[in-house]
Image (spheres, rainbow, N blue to C red):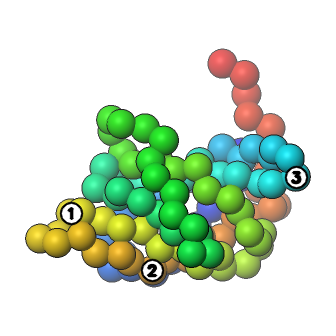
Amino acid sequence: MIDVTLTGGSGRASVISPVRLTVKDGEAMAYIEWSSSNYDYMKVEDEIYYPVNEEGNSVFEIPITVFDQAMPVAADTTAMSMPHEISYSLTFHTDSLKKARKK
């Protein structure tokens, strides 16, 4: 688990923190859960990622390209009259890393 902060956009959206962090084949991946079910994709470095869930708030598994610095991302929301891609930044804080408890 790792704490994440979100900046950018209108300030109305948020992400749940901390997030689940996994490392597979040397690549760090984060599970980002938005405060809304109205996001239909996220973009990281021009790569598009689609939700990993079908119900509830939108959840995405995205790569972490940098720690302890603002990582630019975009997310497309369908909450407005037409879909809009909105620019955000996510910052993953390594000083908050902790092992998740087994359920």
Amino acid, disc 3: Gly
| Other residues around mark 2 within 10 Å, as few (<14) / some (14–19) / many (≥20) | some
Residue 19 seen:
no
Q: On the picture, is 79 further left or further right than 91? A: left
Amino acid, disc 2: Ser
Quadrant of the frame with the N terminus: top right
Please give the label number shown on residue 87: 2
Q: Report how far apart the C-alphas of labels 1 and 2 lie in the structure.
A: 15 Å
Are circles 1 and 2 on residues that touch, CB within 8 Å?
Answer: no
Comparing labels 1 and 3, the label whose residue is closer to the camera: 3
**Circle 3: element type:** loop
Q: Which of the marked residues, 2 or 3, is nearer the chain's N terminus?
A: 3
**Circle 1: element type:** loop
Are circles 2 and 3 on residues that touch, CB within 8 Å?
Answer: no
Residue 68 seen:
yes
Q: On the picture, is 34 further left or further right than 91? A: left
Q: Report how far apart the C-alphas of labels 1 and 3 lie in the structure.
A: 35 Å
Amino acid, disc 1: Ala
Q: Position of residue 64 (x, y in %)?
A: 71, 62
Vertical relation: 8 (above or below) 4: below
| Other residues around mark 1 within 10 Å, as few (<14) / some (14–19) / many (≥20) | few
Residue projecting furthest to the left: 81
Please give the label number shown on residue 26: 3
The image quarter containing residue 10 is bottom left
Task: Report the residue at 17% width, 72% height from top.
Answer: 82
Q: Position of residue 3 (x, y in %)?
A: 66, 57
Vertical relation: 75 (above or below) 36: below
Task: Report the residue at 35% width, 56% height from top.
Answer: 40
Q: Position of residue 84 (x, y in %)?
A: 28, 75
Please give the label number shown on residue 79: 1
Q: Position of residue 24 (x, y in %)?
A: 81, 44
